[in-house]
């Protein structure tokens, strides 16, 4: 049954998909994005959140380096609410190859990336946790970017131009007539309902899942998922992004985000993009390399380990993994395979998501006789919350959490939340002390049509994602779920399951690092929930 | 500093118990404390053994103890010491006016802050949950602004445990305290005050009455004296039941205060903010402990040392990297099954014990650490509580039980 139609349907709610939705919408093209789960559940949130300056690619891939610095500059301007302009450092410690420095400097200069040499003293003054074995340090314009916020802000921007999006909507069939895509069949993963969406062009932007989407249309797309494992530390170990100045390898990059630091990554080719498992060996490899840069690394508490799959596109006969190109391809299936009305975008990097969308839509738009120019670099993703509004909010809100809440909520929802806080004092309850999330914010996000369960709210608000990793808010979130989502979503049905599922989702990232201070934390989690609350139930036998 | 007979390191349940028993043995005792102990995180009820090896509820702790494997601390402590330890504890708290109910023979049940039932062995009367099993109506009292006690959640889970044939009602009282979120301790202070008690009573009285049971968070006063509990039970004319809850645990703090009061009466020296850092060893004996204070390191000499530093949980044992165990004061050998496939269960709330939770110091029947060949490492050092290997305090609900009974045994040795 046909229930919906759009000129273009974009499949995939990662950085690539949201970038395309925004670009198309700003060109005046009617577009709808579908995502099989919640937004940004793949590589766009499962990575280190580095806004590349391009310096990492300066030696091997100058084209990528040039793209990065250009996009870096644009994103700093249009994405003030999701970018933290930290600046970055490239460092060498004893034992690193000194001959790598000159070609790297040359590559940066040729790519237009500014570098500034720091004396050892200055580097250590700026980043006192750096290893005393530091030899060389340069400053570059790297930054940190929040994948969740960036993606949601792209969606908000697209929505202002009529762009639409549906979460928990999975493509299950591509309906083809006369070698032309006519419509798609999707399944609503919440209601299990299946229905058709008519479209003129289907865009496959499914990242590491692009091969599976292509298969549904009877095509081949040789994407090779490459798993990267990352470690999140409980402290802000560094204020700069810190890169190892050497040929890019595993465990080279530290990126600070708010109160935490992320160390990444590995690169392992895997058959299934759903595989986000991690092992002691991967963790140890990252730690061993990381200790070279921050020598006290093993004394910091690890919050969790996570992994995601890069969507590396491998042309037939080419090499995958670390040596595969980080570039992207646009495939017009009409030209390549004789199937009209379907295009695939594959590969690429988070930092250049906007440029990828621009180039892709430059090919797509003419097919629809649309001649509008790309405007995505000209306009801010979202308007900023004004200082006056923030000041007003501080009366009802934990003051130090105001900035964060403003950037994650945006003008409209921030206004709503502050109004609720003002009018209903009981909603001032802070459910998550780590990330300063109030009941009012939870209620507001829960009311969004894309929120079906606590996990959705968690990703939007950061409830339970901070330093306590859900220890204190699992019970609160279960209570909220009970109130707000009862019977709305499978799995959000009884408070004990909600609480267990909430903590289990955290546990997955904790198990591979059950050592050091993480071990203490785990004893506490179990002490509270298994012992004090006996969540496994009472008179079982 | 003058020499003691016994130095006890740690001020949790095990440390305080070891100090009391040692003092009763006529010993001169010094207790080194660092931090608040685990009491604010501790239910303050004494679990002995809630669930067996298969995770099945144990109806009689004493029978359950019989069936634990030989590697379990209870087997080393022995039934006689366990029984004596329970008697000793019950007398100590009763003498302080905070009598605990329950015995080794019959499991007790309390109601948790989310409405599930939890098995335990000894507990304050105000937490005795089975008293409401026969009530016709359960009245669940929440407090406005109090986090972590959600009346709807308690109702949902309690109805599953006690049956849907009872009537369940919920009410939420107002403390008239504004401007911030409340903890149970805040509310307990409010209920303890004359004004607060009056306001509290006025708001719930209409709902209570004969045949009903009133379920409240841990708010019936901050002290272990039953004053508020008895008064409220009388004024409402029905059963009143407190629940366990999130930290800060009011009942854990009540138990700490009661035990500290007993300690004080016995003249035990408690040194605060003294982190035991190093042992001075002569041959196979320890002669003294060096402990860091605010300004300088102090040496504490004794004939006997009891290590109650709380395992991984309290930093008594660390594992900086996989398999790199370290017992922080004496460097005692730690055993554990630190193998990737077994160290952590994939499920947090698992049907198996967690290997990481079973790691600890291996001891002999006298609770002294032994090496792999079974030889005692240090002849005058005894290991108690969470430092011991061979039990998963969460899976089996045995944490305070092992703490209490091992401390008793070590103090008597």
Image: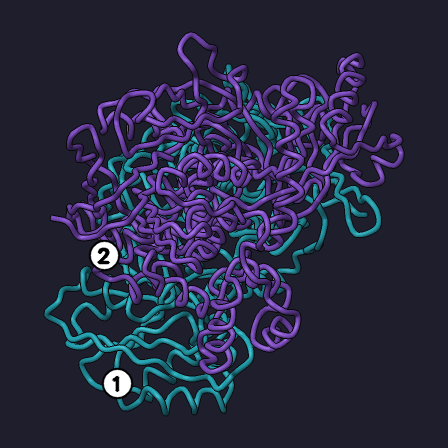
Chain colours: A purple, B cyan
Q: Nearer the viewer, residue A116 or A286?
A: A116
Q: Is residue B81 visible?
A: no
- Give the mark toward the camera: 2 or 1: 2
Position above or below: B296 against A472: above
Provide residue B16's location: percent of width, then percent of height: 56, 53
Q: Residue at horizontal 75%, vertical 40%? A: B301
Q: Are marks 2 and 1 on the same chain?
A: no
Residue drawn at (26%, 23%) of the image: A338
Residue B208 - label: 1
Residue B59, can we see it? yes
Examine the rendered structure and indicate whether residue A417 appears above or below residue B114: below
Q: Is residue A218 left or right of residue A454?
A: left
- Residue B58 versus residue A179 in the image, above or below: below
Q: Are marks 2 and 1 in contact (CB under 8 Å)?
A: no
User: Where is mark 2, residue-wise?
Assistant: A493
Looking at the image, which residue is at 46% across and 14% down? A320
* Mark 1 surroundings: few (<14), some (14-19) or many (≥20) residues within 10 A: many
Residue occupying the far top of the picture: A317
Q: Secondary structure at mark 1?
A: loop
Question: What separation in Å lies between label 2 and label 1 (alpha carbons)?
Answer: 31 Å
User: How many residues crowd mark 2 within 10 Å: few (<14), some (14–19), many (20+)?
Assistant: some
Q: Can you tell which mark lies on residue A164?
A: none
Which residue occupies 38% across, 26% down?
A331
């Amino acid at each position: 049954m046909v229930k919906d139609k759009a000129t273009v349907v974009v499949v995939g709610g990662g950085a690539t998909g949201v970038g395309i939705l925004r670009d198309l919408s700003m060109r005046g093209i009617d577009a709808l994005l579908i995502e099989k789960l919640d937004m940004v559940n793949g590589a766009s949130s499962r990575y280190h959140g580095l806004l590349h300056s391009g310096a990492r690619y300066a030696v091997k891939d100058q084209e990528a380096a040039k793209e990065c610095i250009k996009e870096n500059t644009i994103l700093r301007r249009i994405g003030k609410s999701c970018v933290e302009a930290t600046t970055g450092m490239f460092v060498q410690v004893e034992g690193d190859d000194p001959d790598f420095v000159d070609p790297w400097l040359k590559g940066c200069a040729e790519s237009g990336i500014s570098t500034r040499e720091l004396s050892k003293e200055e580097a250590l003054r700026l980043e006192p946790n750096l290893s005393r074995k530091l030899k060389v340090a340069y400053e570059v314009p790297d930054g940190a970017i929040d994948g969740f916020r960036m993606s949601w802000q792209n969606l908000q921007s697209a929505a202002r131009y009529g762009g639409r999006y549906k979460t928990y909507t999975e493509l299950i069939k591509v309906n083809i007539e006369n070698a032309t895509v006519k419509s798609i069949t999707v399944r609503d993963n919440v209601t299990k309902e299946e229905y058709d969406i008519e479209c003129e062009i289907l865009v496959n932007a499914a990242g590491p899942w692009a091969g599976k989407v292509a298969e549904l249309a009877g095509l081949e797309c040789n994407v090779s998922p490459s798993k990267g494992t990352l470690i999140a530390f409980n402290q802000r170990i560094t204020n700069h992004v810190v890169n190892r100045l050497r040929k890019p390898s595993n465990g080279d990059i530290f990126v600070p985000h708010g109160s935490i630091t992320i160390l990444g990554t590995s690169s392992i080719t895997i058959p299934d993009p759903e595989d986000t498992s991690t092992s002691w060996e991967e963790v140890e490899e990252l730690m061993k390399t990381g200790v070279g840069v921050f020598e006290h690394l093993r004394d910091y508490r690890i919050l969790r380990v996570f992994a995601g799959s890069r969507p590396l596109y491998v042309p037939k006969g080419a090499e995958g993994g670390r040596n595969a190109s980080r570039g992207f391809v646009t495939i017009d299936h009409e030209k390549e395979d004789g199937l009209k009305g379907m295009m695939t975008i594959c590969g690429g990097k988070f930092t250049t998501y906007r440029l990828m969308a621009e180039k892709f839509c430059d090919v797509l738009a003419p097919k629809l006789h649309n001649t509008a120019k790309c405007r995505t670099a000209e306009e801010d993703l979202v308007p900023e919350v004004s200082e006056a509004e923030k000041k007003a909010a501080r009366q009802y809100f934990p003051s130090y959490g105001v900035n964060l809440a403003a950037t994650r909520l945006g003008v409209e929802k921030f206004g709503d939340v502050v109004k609720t806080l003002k009018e209903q004092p009981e909603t001032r309850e802070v459910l998550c002390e780590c990330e300063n999330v109030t009941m009012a914010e939870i209620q507001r996000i829960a009311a969004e049509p894309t929120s079906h369960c606590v996990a959705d709210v968690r990703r939007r608000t950061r409830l339970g994602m901070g330093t306590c990793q859900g220890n204190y808010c699992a019970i609160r979130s279960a209570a909220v779920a009970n109130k707000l989502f009862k019977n709305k979503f499978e799995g959000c049905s009884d408070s004990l399951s909600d609480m267990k599922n909430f903590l289990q989702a955290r546990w997955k990232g904790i198990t591979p690092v059950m050592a050091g201070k993480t071990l203490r934390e785990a004893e506490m989690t179990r002490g509270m929930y298994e012992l004090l609350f006996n969540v496994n139930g009472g008179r079982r036998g | 500093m003058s020499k003691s007979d016994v130095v006890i390191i740690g001020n949790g349940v095990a440390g305080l118990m070891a100090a009391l028993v040692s003092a009763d043995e006529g010993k001169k005792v010094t207790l080194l404390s660092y931090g608040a102990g685990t009491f604010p995180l501790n239910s303050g009820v004494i679990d002995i053994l809630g669930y067996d090896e298969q995770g099945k509820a144990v109806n009689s702790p004493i029978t359950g103890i019989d069936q634990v494997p030989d590697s379990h601390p209870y087997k080393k402590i022995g039934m006689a010491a366990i029984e004596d330890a329970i008697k000793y504890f019950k007398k100590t708290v009763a003498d302080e006016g905070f009598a605990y109910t329950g015995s080794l023979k019959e499991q007790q049940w309390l109601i948790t802050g989310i409405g599930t039932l939890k098995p335990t062995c000894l507990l304050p009367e105000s937490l005795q949950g089975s008293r409401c099993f026969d009530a016709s109506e359960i009245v669940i009292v929440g407090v406005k602004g109090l986090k972590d006690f959600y009346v709807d959640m308690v109702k949902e889970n309690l109805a599953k445990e006690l049956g849907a044939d009872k009537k369940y009602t919920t009410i939420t009282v107002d403390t008239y305290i504004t401007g911030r979120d409340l903890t149970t301790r805040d509310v307990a202070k409010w209920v303890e005050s004359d004004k607060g008690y009056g306001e509290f009573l006025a708001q719930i009285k209409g709902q209570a009455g004969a045949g009903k049971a009133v379920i409240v968070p841990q708010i019936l006063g901050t002290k272990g004296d039953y004053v508020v509990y008895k008064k409220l039970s009388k004024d409402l004319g029905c059963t009143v039941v407190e629940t366990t809850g999130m930290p800060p645990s009011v009942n854990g703090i009540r138990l700490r205060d009661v035990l500290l009061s007993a300690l004080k009466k016995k003249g035990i020296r408690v040194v605060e903010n003294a982190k035991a850092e190093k042992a001075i060893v002569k041959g196979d004996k320890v002669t003294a402990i060096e402990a860091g204070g605010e300004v300088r390191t102090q040496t504490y000499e004794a004939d006997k040392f009891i290590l109650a530093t709380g395992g991984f949980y309290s930093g008594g044992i660390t594992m900086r990297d996989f398999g790199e165990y370290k017992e922080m004061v004496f460097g005692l050998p730690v055993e554990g099954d630190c193998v990737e496939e077994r160290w952590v269960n994939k499920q947090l709330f698992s049907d198996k014990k967690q290997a990481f939770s079973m790691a600890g110091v291996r001891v002999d029947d006298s609770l002294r650490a032994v090496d792999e060949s079974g030889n005692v490492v240090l002849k005058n050092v005894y290991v108690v509580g969470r430092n011991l290997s061979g039990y998963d305090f969460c899976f089996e609900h045995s944490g305070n039980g092992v703490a209490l009974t091992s401390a008793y045994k070590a103090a008597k040795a």
